[in-house]
Image (cartoon, rainbow, N blue to C red):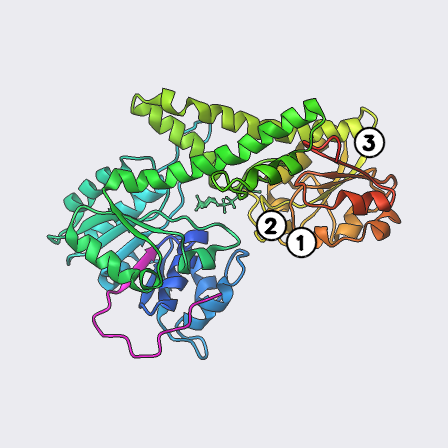
Amino acid sequence: MLMTMPTQTQPRALPKITVIGTGYLGATHAAALAELGFEVLGLDVLPDKIASLSRGEVPFYEPGLGDILRRHVSGLPGSSGRLSFTTSYTDAAAFGDIHFICVNTPQKPGEYACDMSYVDAAVESLAPHLTRPALVVGKSTVPVGSAARLARRVAELAPAEGAELAWNPEFLREGFAVEDTLRPDRIVVGVTSERAETLLREVYAKPVAEGVPFLVTDLPTAELVKTAANAFLSTKISFINAMAEICEAADGDVVKLAEALGHDDRIGKKFLRAGIGFGGGCLPKDIRAFMARAGELGASEALSFLREIDSINMRRRASMVELTRETLDGSLLGKRVAVLGAAFKPDSDDVRDSPALNIAGQLHLQGAEVTVYDPKAMENAKRLFPTLRYAATATEAATGAHAVLHLTEWREFRELDPAALAEVVSTRHVLDGRNTLDPALWRKANWTYRALGRPTA
Ligand code: UGA
């Protein structure tokens, strides 16, 4: 559900906002701030991205984002005109009172640490143009200590007195980005001055008035809230996946186990879905960057458990490959495998570190003929794994298959008719990597249903 726009005219004094980096995070943040009534200028160094956003087109799949974007992008019929885009840092500095940095911080190739070059470049490019007091606000996920370092850079580089930096981590989930931005669970701001806090309270006045908790911290705590949250979520998923391994050894059912655990309020049922584990552009690289940073701080022991969380997670992918081999009488050579799902999770076209694609790739390398279908992530998947086969529908992917693997839990796959699919496959083996298909339904249509952590399901 989206917020409606305020009906009264906004006071003139509202701060003007820029959003630097217009990926999942930045594009959503920019559109959401325009929705909240602010004038916003989005900046990206990629001209193609800026051209597409300026036409009101989202260059990736995110439910609901296109609608709010088109409501506000200047020049579009019927839009509020509050949102524009640029590639120029000079324009951004001239426009904004508050500058949100939303660029990505990927894992460095061959290392655990995160690559800060985009964040650094954003600060280095913007700060020399800050000729009036301005607040730079980091939202990217960064190693603790970065904000203090960048605050010093802003003070050194900005010609204006009073240019300063704050940290305001983002907790949005892909697939729910708009909702999470407009109605977050909490807003955390790390500040070093009252002025910064006042400005950020102004930015978030509407959600705060609607009851969203607003927490004020120092810079390192704000950075840590984000990495600690992602570390906790990863731990919860790997915990239940470790229980899945035990269920496999002890003939238990991890889905029932998770359901029963989830009824305990102290544990809760969210993020206890066992399966092929977590992927995407955040959790895997964030736990690794967190371990790397702890090492630099001389506190590596505190996070050594995250290495285990990572191993449990990566083992799930290998287990799925083994379960497939076992189902196909011990050999993958020449076997046809249909893979349903390529995105790292449903309602997203993001294939970064996707467990589904990783498994598809491993099966292919071990001699299976793999055909992949995903409702939204086909183009991204083809770019990353051009040697896999791709089909236009789930049925086409399953045609002639010796096994059907369900690896991303799109609603479309839950709604498949097992009896109809049975007509097109070579052998009726379904392997559920997300534990969301109904075993009884598939077995009724004479399929063998197998899943991780559910030998008895
Ligand atoms: C994650 C966090 O949930 C956000 O709060 C955070 O803002 C974001 O990272 C970020 O750092 O920017 P996201 O990567 O969009 O969000 O995806 P999640 O919904 O957390 O799912 C991550 C992975 O865990 C997916 O592959 C999903 O399939 C898997 N997962 C999730 C499970 O295997 N089991 C579960 O019970 C839940």
Kindly identify the residue that appears in the image at 43 percent across and 35 percent down. Answer: 231
At a point 44% along the width and 55% down the height, the residue shown is: 180
Which of marks 2 and 1 precedes in the sequence? 2
Q: Amino acid at mark 3?
A: Gly
- The mark found on residue 334 in the picture is 3
Contact check, label 1 and label 2, Cβ < 8 Å: yes
Q: Which mark is residue 143?
A: none
Up-down relation of residue 81 to residue 339 (above or below): below
Q: Is the C-beta of the residue carrying label 2 under 8 Å from the nearest atom of ligand 1?
A: yes
| Amino acid type at image mark 2 | Pro
Q: Position of residue 190 (x, y in %)?
A: 25, 46
Task: Kindly state the secondary structure of the residue where label 3 is placed.
Answer: loop
Pick whichever, 435 or 5, lies toward us. 435
Q: Main secondary structure of the magenta part?
A: loop
Query: Element under label 2?
Result: loop
Is residue 177 toward the left or the right of residue 339 in the image?
left
Q: Is residue 270 magenta?
A: no
| Residue 155, quarter of the rendered image | top left
Mark 3 Cβ inside 8 Å of ligand 1: no
Q: Look at discs 3 and 2 and give the one toward the viewer.
A: 2
Q: Quadrant of residue 14?
A: bottom left
Rounded to the nearest whole Å, what is the CA distance between mark 3 and mark 2? Answer: 29 Å
Disc 1 vs disc 3: which is toward the camera?
A: 1
| Secondary structure type for disc 1 | helix
- Callout 1 amino acid: Arg
CA separation, marks 1 and 2?
8 Å
Between 209 and 94, which is closer to the camera in this rendering? 209
Q: Is residue 106 visible?
A: no
Mark carried by residue 411 = 1
Q: CA distance from mark 1 to mark 3?
A: 30 Å
Q: Which residues are magenta?
A: 1-19
